[in-house]
Amino acid sequence: MAGLIALLDDVAGIAKVAAASVDDVAGMSAKAGLKAAGAVIDDAAVTPKYVHGFDADREVPIVLRIARGSIVNKVAILLPIALLLSAFAPWAITPLLMIGGAYLCFEGAEKVWHAIRPHEVEKADTGMEQGDPTHLEEAKVKGAIKTDFILSAEIMTIALATIPPEQGIVMKGLVLLAVAVAITVAVYGAVALIVKADDYGMALARTRTGFLAAAGKRLVKVMPGFMSTLSVVGTAAMLWVGGNIVLHGFAELGLPGAYDRIHHWAEGATHASPDRFDGLVAWAVTAFFDGLAGLAIGLVLIPVAFNVIGPAIAAVTGKQAAH
């Protein structure tokens, strides 16, 4: 009897440890997901364009194919790479994180530049809108998965950087797996809802009367504006998160000037605001100046990307650089 009681006590102890571990994984995964907000929002804003032009009954299957590719990117490729880096080259995490942040800055600044100086950025895509739908779908899905790989690499690197270094490789793996699955489900679940929202609205308008019909018509009307707003929010998030990552990286490497200055301004703003708004004011000021820094970094990178990096890649791959 005493042995049974001791065994049950041990089982209870193990259960408590397991529960604590689950809580730790959930907490660190949530923190990592918030840190990756810029890339996540951009992912959700970018993906719907890959189903544009297809029949309505192909939209969700295409999103599901891209989601499966995203899971493969994150779990089968990027997660093992992240764990290897953590175990054998932790010094590389900050530089890689800064490269990902710089890419976010570049993408955000390029969108701002195109809004200010619009040009025929879709010229190269016009030829793909014709031809066999099956081949077009394959090309679109492959393109989306390639784009997802870049964004997923940023997400996984950001997530890895938020995990305390003292955590073991198993805990890091569990957190990264949780982040990979949760973000993929959230992003592509949201994308599926977005791409079908106008169809659902039209169905309501055709088959229902009264309030539901009016709601359906309203949904169809607001979706274009919603997509535009999502794009703007995604761009702002990229600049904010990218700028913060780069500046924080410089601080980690011994150049804390800009990072500390922004935090000093945020603290000053909180002192001038009511106490109940301290957190909101500090976040808003930090995000604003991080975003400005991200925009400046991105604008510097635009000519570098198109005049140096692009031609270099074209010379290696034999493909014409995009302009």
Image (cartoon, rainbow, N blue to C red):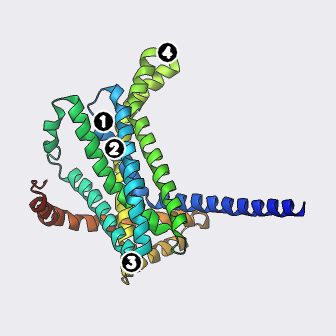
Foreground mark, 3 or 4, reads 3
Crowdedness near tag 4: few (<14), some (14–19) or many (≥20) residues, C-alpha within 10 Å: few
Residue at which label 3 appears = 91
Q: Earlier in the sequence, mark 1 or mark 3?
A: 1
Marks 2/1 in contact by CB < 8 Å: the verdict is yes
Crowdedness near tag 1: few (<14), some (14–19) or many (≥20) residues, C-alpha within 10 Å: many
Residue at which label 4 appears = 209
Foreground mark, 4 or 1, reads 1
Image position, residue 1 (x, y; %):
90, 60
SS type, badge 4: loop
Image position, residue 260 (x, y; %):
43, 79
Residue 300 image-quadrant placement? bottom left
| Residue drawn where x is 43% and y is 46% of the image | 187
Residue type at mark 1 is Val
Image position, residue 86 (x, y; %):
43, 71
Q: Earlier in the sequence, mark 2 or mark 4?
A: 2
> Which residue reaches farthest right?
1
